Image (cartoon, rainbow, N blue to C red):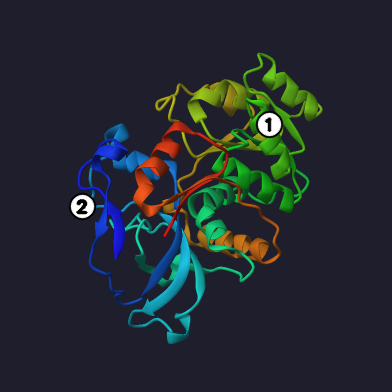
Amino acid sequence: MRAAWYDRNGAAREVLTVGELPDPEPGPGEVRVRVAAAGVNPADVKRRSGVGGRAMTAPRVIPGDDGAGIIDRVGPGVPADRVGRRVWVHAAGQHSPFGTSAEYVVVPDAQAVELPGAVGFEAGACLGVPALTAHRCLLADGPVDGATVLVTGGAGGVGHYAIQLAKNHGATVIATASTGEKQRAALASGADHVVDYRRTDAAEAILDLTGGRGADRVVDVAFGANLPLTSAAVATNGTIASYASDAVPEPALPFYPLMRRGIVVRMVLVYVMPEDALRSGLEDITELLARDALDHPIAARHPLDEIAAAHEAVETGSGIGKVIVNL
């Protein structure tokens, strides 16, 4: 099969190779997916670059957690009628060094989720990490029907799905975004209001939009950097659910101001979601896909031979939406 891989950490153009590798075979409880499109996430480029002390997990790594395609072979214990099913794949590279940036990927059967017929493979490749992360951040602490949700980084991958999920679950959504393009993207996703987080009065603006109460739930892209804003803008007994803190990896926590208002701080990592939460997320997302209730902006498309450019596009943050590798 054609595949992209790296055998050492480093810059994309220095370490990524595209060539031929043996076709993988599914083992017990596994399926093989003929990949049509793979999504590139920030986690993929961080693992490849080795940033933050990340080390190689195997002598050779095929990057990619997310993708979509058709099951063409099943292992022992998997029903034969799974062959031919259109699926989207999540967490392919988490427990295996062989991810979705290849013509074939093998994953546990449960990680190949039925893709409704009207949903394209590129859209399926957008889901995975961002959609499931958004679902966990949004709903880990109960329903949001009638609540106000603050989504920081509303034009980002997780933020985009968090806005859509929150609106589908009956919430009022306030998003933060900087540039006019990003603000328009957050509004297009369904946000009711957008606030420029660079404003010195951003917290006051959010409080004004909530009648002084604050947001019941915060879905946060940059915990440490955003803490002055989110801690001021969250409602008493609210939750700040964060999935990253790249700029400030060891933030100082204003413990007593948060404690005195009963604020819950939740850290979310999609790969360790409890099984019931993962199942709920998959069911919810699948139902919304079937109703065509989600959209999936794509920032750039690259063929497999240009995977280094795809990784660089994610690293530089150019464009709004997912970066896709087509196979």
Residue at the extreme left = 59
Q: Position of residue 178 (x, y in %)?
A: 62, 25
- For disc 2, the neighbor class at 10 Å (few under 14, some 14 to 19, many from 20) is few
Specify the quadrant that holds the C terminus. Answer: bottom left
Q: Which residue is at 45% across, 32% downward?
A: 316
Q: Nearer the viewer, residue 81 or 207?
A: 81
- Seen in the image, is 189 located left or right of residue 44? right
Q: Position of residue 284 (x, y in %)?
A: 63, 61
Rendered position, 195 above or below 243: above
- For disc 1, the neighbor class at 10 Å (few under 14, some 14 to 19, many from 20) is many
Rendered position, 50 above or below 288: above
Q: Which residue is mark 1?
A: 183
Q: Which residue is at 77% across, 38% downward?
A: 192
Q: Earlier in the sequence, mark 1 or mark 2?
A: 2
Rendered position, 182 above or below 268: above
**Quadrant of the rendered image containing residue 99:** bottom left
Q: Give, as a three-letter code, the residue at label 1.
A: Gln
Q: Which residue is mark 2?
A: 58
Q: Position of residue 250 (x, y in %)?
A: 40, 25
Which type of secondary structure does the marked residue at label 2 adopt?
loop
Q: Position of residue 287 (x, y in %)?
A: 65, 65
Q: Which residue is at 53% across, 64% downward?
A: 279
Q: Nearer the viewer, residue 24 or 301?
A: 301
Q: Which residue is at 62% across, 19% downward?
A: 198
- Kindly tell me whether residue 235 is visible in this rendering: no
- Seen in the image, is 96 located left or right of residue 314? left
Contact (Cβ within 8 Å) of mark 1 with mark 2: no
Q: Give, as a three-letter code, the residue at label 2.
A: Ala
- Seen in the image, is 201 located left or right of residue 240? right
- Separation (CA) of disc 1 from disc 2: 41 Å
Residue at the extreme right = 211
